[in-house]
C-alpha cells in the first residue's frame, strides 16, 4: 500500500520514553527505600521537568534494556510489572528513535511474549493490547502475515474493550493492511471504514494514511470512482496540514487512480505538482517516472516517455518490486512503440520474472490464508462442540438439583401434609378471588380498548375526509393556476402581435412610403437595382411581420382550431413553394380554448421546422379522434434523417415535447433518410 507501516512519530516515542524512564527511576528508589512519601512526587516532577535527562538514558534500545535489568526480578505487584510491560513493549517493537525497525526479530518476539504473559497474569487489558499489537506488526514485517493477523485480531478484542480511539484506529488499520496484503480487499475496506472515525479523533497523519489506504483498496477492486474520491481526500488533507512527505505519497497515489480512470488532465496536474515537492524519496521517484512515461504514451510521445524511464532506471534498485515491475513493463511498451523489439523483449522478461515472483508469493500467502480460514472454522466448530458439552453438563447438573429439590419437597409434604393442605386451600380461595377481580379488570380493559379503537377509526375517517377535501382544493387551485398561465400566455401573444402589427408594421409602412417617394428614373442603373431590391425586401418584411402578428394569436381561433388551421394553410399555399394539405375533421368544443391555442402553436412550430429544414415539396396535416384521444400527424416528403445515429433533437422539438406534455399528451418522431419525416401528437382528452 502507499505508505504501509511508515509512521515515524518521534514526538510520541520521546514522550513515552520519558514517561517510562521516570517510572523506572521512581520504582528503583522506592525499592531501595530512598524516597519518602512526600519526596516521591518531588522526584517524579524533577525528572519530567528535565526531558533531556530522560532521553539521555532511554533514547536507544541498550538504555531501555539496562533500565529493564535494573527492575526487581521477582515481583508480583501491578506497579512494577506494568513498568516492565511498558519497557518490554518498547523493546519488542524493535524501533529506533525515528520509528524504523532495527531490532532482532526473535528477541523482539520473546520480549513481547513476556509482556503478554505478565499482562495476562495481572489481567491488564492495555498491556495485552500493546503486546499483541506490536507482535502482530512485527510478524507482518517479517512476512508471517497469518500469525500477525491472529495477533492483531486479539489486539482488536482488547481495543474494543478499552474503547479508546487511538487503539481502535491502530488495530482496525493494521488489520486492513494485512487483509490487503492477503488480497482480501473487501475485508480491508471493511476495517478501514471502521478506522475512519477513531483515526480522525487521534492523529492527522494517521487519518490521512487510513483514507489513502481506503482509496488504494478500492483501486485494487477497479472501483475507480470511489478510489478517486478517497485518494483526492487524502491529497487535500496532506496539503491542508502542510506535510510534504505525505503530500508526495498521496499525489502519486491519486495520479494512479487518475490513470486508471482515464482522467488525463488531472493526471498531468498531479505529475507537475509532484515534481515541485521538496521532500526526497528516490524509491517513489521511480514510480513517478513510470507514471510520467505512461502519461507521455497516452499522448503518443514515446521518445519523451523513454527519457523519463531512463531516469527511473537509474534509481530502480531503491524501489520496491511493484514499482520496478511497473518500470520494466512500461519500458517494454515504449520500446515496442519505437520498434525496438529486442529491447522490448528484454524488459518484458524482467517484468515477467518479477511478476512470477510476486504471483508465487501472493499464491503462497493466499494458501496460508485459506489454511488460516480453515483452521479458524475448525476451531469455531470445536468451540461450538465444547459449548454444547458445557450446556449438556449444566443441564445434567440442573436436573440433578431439581431431583434433590423435588425429593426434599416431597419429604416436607409427607411431614406437614395436613398443614400444607389447609394453607393451600386458603391460598386457592384467595387466588380464586384474585382471579375474579383480575377477570373483571380484564373485561373493563377490553371495553376501554374497544372504545379507543372506535375513536381511533373515527379520527382516521375524519382525517381521511379532510385530506380528500384538501386534495380536491389543491387540484382546483392547480387548474386555476394552469388557466391563469394559459391566459397570460394568450394575452402576451396578443400584446406581441399588436406591437408587431401596430408599431413595427407602421414603421415599415412609413419607410416604404418614403422610399417610394424617391424618383428611380433619377438614379443610376446600379442604384435603381439597389432601390428595386430594397423596395422588394421591405415589402417582404412587411408581409412577414403581418404573417407573424396574425398567426401568433389568429382571430380564426375564436371560430375553432380547424378554421384557424384552414386559414393558416391557405396563407402558406399562397406564399411558399411547399404544398400544404389539411385532412380530417376536428369536432368543436373537443378541447378548451386555451388547449386549442397551445395546439395551434405546436402546429406553427412543426410547420416552421418543415419550411426551414425539410426540403420537401408537399406536407400533410391529419386530424383524427378516438374515444378519448385526439391525434395530430404532420408528414412531409423531404430529406428525412437517420434516427439511429443518436443525433440530438433541436431546441424547437424539445419545446414542442414540453408543450405536448403540458397538454397531457405524447410527442413522437419517425423518419428515415430520403423518405421524409412524420411528427405525431396524441392528446388524452380529460
Image (spheres, rainbow, N blue to C red):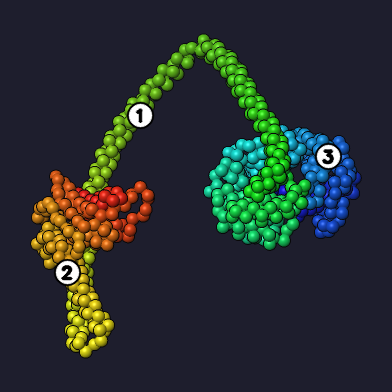
Which residue is identified by label 1?
438
Which residue is identified by label 3?
104
Find the distance from the CA under tag 2 to the CA under tag 1. Answer: 89 Å
Task: Give 27 or 371, whichever is nearer the viewer.
Answer: 371
Under circle 1, the secondary element is: helix
Q: Which mark is residue 594?
A: none
Query: Which mark is in front, 3 or 1?
Result: 3
Drawn side of residue 385 relative to residue 143, left or right: left
Tell which residue pokes out farthest to the top in this image.
414
Tell which residue pokes out farthest to the bottom in this image.
522
Q: Residue at x 24, y 57 (%)?
A: 616
Under circle 3, the secondary element is: loop
Query: Which mark is in front, 3 or 2?
Result: 2
Query: Which mark is in front, 2 or 1?
Result: 2
Drawn side of residue 330 relative to residue 93, left or right: left
Drawn side of residue 295 relative to residue 629, left or right: right
Which residue is identified by label 2?
550
Task: Give 360 or 78, whichever is nearer the viewer.
Answer: 360
State the image quarter where residue 660 is shown: bottom left
Amino acid at each position: 500500500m502507499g505508505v504501509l507501516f511508515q509512521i515515524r512519530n518521534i514526538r510520541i516515542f520521546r514522550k513515552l520514553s520519558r514517561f517510562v524512564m521516570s517510572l523506572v527511576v521512581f520504582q528503583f528508589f522506592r525499592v531501595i527505600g530512598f524516597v519518602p512519601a512526600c519526596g516521591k512526587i518531588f522526584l517524579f516532577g524533577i525528572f519530567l521537568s528535565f526531558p533531556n535527562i530522560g532521553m539521555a538514558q532511554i533514547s536507544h534500545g541498550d538504555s531501555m534494556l539496562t533500565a529493564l535489568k535494573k527492575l526487581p526480578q521477582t515481583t508480583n505487584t501491578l506497579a512494577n510489572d506494568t513498568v516492565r510491560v511498558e519497557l518490554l513493549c518498547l523493546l519488542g517493537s524493535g524501533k529506533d528513535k525515528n520509528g524504523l525497525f532495527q531490532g532482532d526479530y526473535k528477541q523482539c518476539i520473546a520480549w513481547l511474549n513476556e509482556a503478554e504473559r505478565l499482562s495476562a497474569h495481572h489481567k491488564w487489558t492495555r498491556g495485552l493490547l500493546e503486546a499483541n499489537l506490536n507482535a502482530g506488526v512485527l510478524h507482518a514485517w517479517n512476512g508471517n502475515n497469518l500469525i500477525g493477523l491472529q495477533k492483531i485480531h486479539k489486539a482488536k478484542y482488547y481495543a474494543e474493550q478499552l474503547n479508546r480511539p487511538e487503539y481502535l484506529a491502530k488495530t482496525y488499520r493494521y488489520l486492513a493492511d494485512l487483509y490487503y496484503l492477503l488480497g482480501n480487499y473487501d475485508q480491508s475496506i471493511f476495517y478501514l471504514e471502521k478506522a475512519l472515525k477513531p483515526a480522525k479523533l487521534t492523529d492527522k497523519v494517521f487519518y490521512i494514511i487510513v483514507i489513502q489506504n481506503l482509496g488504494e483498496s478500492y483501486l485494487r477492486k477497479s472501483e475507480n470512482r470511489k478510489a478517486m474520491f478517497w485518494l483526492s481526500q487524502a491529497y487535500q488533507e496532506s496539503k491542508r496540514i502542510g506535510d510534504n512527505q505525505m503530500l508526495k505519497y498521496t499525489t502519486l497515489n491519486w495520479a494512479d487512480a487518475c490513470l486508471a480512470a482515464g482522467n488525463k488532465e488531472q493526471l498531468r496536474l498531479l505529475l507537475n505538482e509532484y515534481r515541485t515537492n521538496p521532500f526526497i524519496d528516490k524509491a517513489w521517484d521511480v514510480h513517478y517516472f513510470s507514471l510520467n512515461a505512461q502519461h507521455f504514451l497516452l499522448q503518443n510521445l514515446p521518445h519523451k516517455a523513454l527519457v523519463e524511464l531512463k531516469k527511473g532506471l537509474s534509481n530502480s534498485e531503491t524501489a520496491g518490486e511493484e514499482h520496478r515491475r511497473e518500470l520494466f513493463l512500461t519500458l517494454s511498451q515504449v520500446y515496442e512503440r519505437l520498434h525496438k523489439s529486442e529491447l522490448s523483449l528484454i524488459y518484458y522478461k524482467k517484468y515477467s520474472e518479477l511478476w512470477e515472483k510476486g504471483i508465487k508469493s501472493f499464491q503462497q500467502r493466499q494458501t496460508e490464508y485459506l489454511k488460516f480460514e480453515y483452521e479458524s472454522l475448525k476451531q469455531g466448530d470445536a468451540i461450538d462442540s465444547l459449548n454444547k458439552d458445557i450446556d449438556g453438563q449444566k443441564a445434567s447438573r440442573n436436573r440433578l438439583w431439581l431431583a434433590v429439590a423435588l425429593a426434599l419437597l416431597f419429604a416436607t409434604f409427607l411431614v406437614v401434609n395436613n398443614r400444607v393442605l389447609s394453607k393451600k386451600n386458603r391460598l386457592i380461595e384467595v387466588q380464586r378471588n384474585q382471579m375474579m377481580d383480575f377477570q373483571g379488570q380484564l373485561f373493563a380493559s377490553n371495553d376501554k380498548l374497544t372504545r379507543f379503537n372506535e375513536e381511533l377509526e373515527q379520527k382516521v375517517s375524519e382525517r381521511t375526509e379532510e385530506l380528500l377535501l384538501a386534495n380536491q382544493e389543491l387540484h382546483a387551485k392547480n387548474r386555476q393556476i394552469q388557466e391563469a398561465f394559459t391566459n397570460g400566455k394568450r394575452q402576451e401573444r396578443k400584446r406581441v402581435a399588436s406591437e408587431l402589427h401596430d408599431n413595427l408594421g407602421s414603421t415599415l409602412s412609413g419607410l416604404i412610403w418614403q422610399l417610394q417617394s424617391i424618383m428611380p428614373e433619377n438614379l443610376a442603373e446600379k442604384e435603381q437595382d439597389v432601390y428595386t431590391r430594397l423596395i422588394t425586401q421591405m415589402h417582404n418584411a412587411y408581409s412577414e411581420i403581418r404573417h407573424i402578428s396574425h398567426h401568433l394569436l389568429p382571430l380564426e381561433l375564436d371560430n375553432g382550431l380547424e378554421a384557424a388551421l384552414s386559414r393558416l394553410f391557405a396563407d402558406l399555399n399562397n406564399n411558399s413553394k411547399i404544398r400544404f394539405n389539411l385532412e380530417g375533421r376536428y369536432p368543436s368544443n373537443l378541447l378548451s380554448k386555451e388547449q386549442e391555442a397551445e395546439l395551434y402553436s405546436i402546429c406553427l412550430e412543426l410547420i416552421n421546422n418543415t419550411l426551414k429544414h425539410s426540403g420537401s415539396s408537399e406536407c400533410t396535416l391529419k386530424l383524427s379522434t378516438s374515444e378519448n384521444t385526439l391525434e395530430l400527424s404532420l408528414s412531409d416528403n423531404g430529406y428525412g434523417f437517420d434516427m439511429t445515429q443518436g443525433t440530438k433533437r433541436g431546441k424547437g422539438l424539445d419545446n414542442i415535447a414540453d408543450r405536448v406534455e403540458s397538454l397531457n399528451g405524447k410527442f413522437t418522431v419517425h423518419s428515415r433518410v430520403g423518405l421524409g419525416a412524420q411528427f405525431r401528437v396524441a392528446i388524452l382528452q380529460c
